[in-house]
Amino acid sequence: MLPVRSKKMSVVLCAVGTLGLAIGIGWLPWRAAKFPKPPTEEAQPNQSSPYRNVRAEVHYVGNEVCATCHPSHAETYRHHPMSHSFAPVAHGSPATHDDSYVSQSFQVDGFDYLVEHRGSVLVHREARRDAAGKVVAEAEAEVQFTIGSGAHGATYVVRHEDYLFQSPISWYAATQTLALAPSHQQHNLHFERRIDDNCLFCHCDDARPVEHSLNRFQQPISSRYGIGCERCHGPGELHVQRYKKGGIHSGADDTIVNPRRLEPNLREAVCEQCHLQGANRVLRRGRQPHDYRPGLPLQHYWTVFVHRAGSEKLQRAVSQVEQLHESRCFRESKGELGCISCHNPHALPGSADRIAIFRARCLNCHQDTSCRETPERRLALSNADDCTACHMPRRKTKDIAHAAITDHRILRRPPADFGVQKSVASLPDDIPVPFYLESSGALGADLDRDLGIALTQWPGTQQQRALAEQALSLLESSLRNWPNDIAGMEAKGLALRLTGRPREALQAFQDCLSGEPEDEFALLSAAETSAQLGNLDAARSYFRHTGFAPF
């Protein structure tokens, strides 16, 4: 592999930030877990699912085993974007082997970006020039993986030893151009932005992070790339055993989850495990990312915070679930309408069939004569009489340049604004609230703990210090109940930093390390806090323990 190479790039990095770039202050890692790791019994309280494959001891079998009995679904799904959501560059991608992609270059803020093919190796380059055009700093890295199928875009992963980083270069399908990666547009970390299990969770079934690290992975990183059958149907071990025995089976099959047969909230949770990103997702206490299994309530594993009514942040790239819940169609269907009412998870409609297929979905509930517009007017607006052209228009996203999303509010007369109606009176207007608001009240202290963690993750808000103070109160109460909650201790350290108490923050990070000596987030936070306090020797010691040495 071609490692990251640089020429005086440290000079450039120092020009755009401080040691905070290395740590990503305001961001908390979730607790990494190997996949497929069976959930602990604590992580699955009061299971009442009729499906036996939600149990902790049931194992995954892999896509190829599923394909032996379900070849038609397997074949169509091989062409679905979800099956190509993460892959090595060598496997090919619409955004890695096209000549127009490779020949492009662009400039941003005085940096030149270029893509090169060197035989079978794909290389991304970044360079800084002086006023005379002379290169004064440069870096390059071999691209190892693509994240994203290329249908809407793709971002790229470079690997240095066992550590994954995001390239600053991304591909945007709508414009067929290269540009700065979404996460780099507000804060360019060049080749230093870490790729963690958070990034890969919704793109890859079995990424294997090293426990307590931020972006280190076991090799090979994955044995099954993309999203597979069992991500929606649950582990298939019992199902395979049932049919290997032969014979005729009658009645409902309780060995494998069929999302269509789940009650509405559980059915929607299957999609929401990835498509409900919200403003922030906080992993519940004692949980691991892959503990959730289809057929179980998602809110037992994640607290998802969403933006309030009127927030333009609902016009983000992944906000369709929140929008759908504001739809009158969704609310009045009493659970009949859901994601898979319109979207076939096994096959993506071709461009020639898309309009007819989605129009037919609308006419399952509505009459052709229901539309207030005359047929002539409708055909003038869309010559294919496309319902979505008026009621689910495409809109530019607020968080990703060169990208658009379909408005899932399904409004009769869609206005320009976006918004949700959920609210909690005690929080400032721009602070997100729990998505599962109706069922959150029973969580009690657990919800306070999750809110405390979440409040440390919006450092850009105007009420930053006040929110950190509120977070600190919630976290200190939570830690009295659960003193060994590492994620809570990490958040407490951040809250103390945000309220201007670095010495107390350092003690909080040291408390984390007394419980988890290899916790890389706590090590880097302790290093930065020590440097802030002027103790560079201690900062170097913490940094060296992670293998990261910025000075």
Image (spheres, helix red, strand yellow):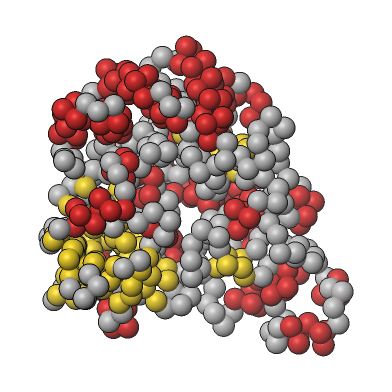
| Residue 446, above or below 423 | above
Residue found 43% across the figure and 27% down from its top: 500
Across and down, in percent, residue 86 comes to 34, 59
Residue at position x 36%, y 73% in the image: 178
Q: Quadrant of the C terminus?
A: top left
Question: As drawn, is 324 to the left or to the right of 13?
Answer: right
Quarter of the rendering occupied by the N terminus: bottom left
Along the line of sight, the residue nearer the viewer: 429 or 410: 429
Camera-nearest residue between 52 and 189: 189
Q: Which residue of the protein is positioned furthest toward the top in this rendering?
A: 480
Does 140 appear above or below 516? Answer: below
* Residue 80 percent location from the top left of the image: 45, 67
Q: Is residue 442 above or below residue 5?
A: above
Q: Residue furthest front?
A: 131
* Callout count: 0
Left or right of residue 360, residue 319 in this image: left
Out of 30 and 474, give the one closest to the viewer: 474
Q: Position of residue 146 (x, y in %)?
A: 31, 63
Image point 86% across, 82% down: which residue?
Answer: 374
- Residue 152 coordinates in the image, percent (x, y): 46, 69
Q: Is residue 119 visible?
A: yes
Q: Is residue 172 left or right of residue 525?
A: right
- Which quadrant of the structure image shows residue 110? bottom left
Nearest to the observer: residue 82 or residue 451: 451
| Point 25% across, 50% down: residue | 14
- The answer to whether one can see residue 247 in this image is no
| In this view, 399 is above or below 213 | below
Q: Is residue 197 left or right of residue 286?
A: left
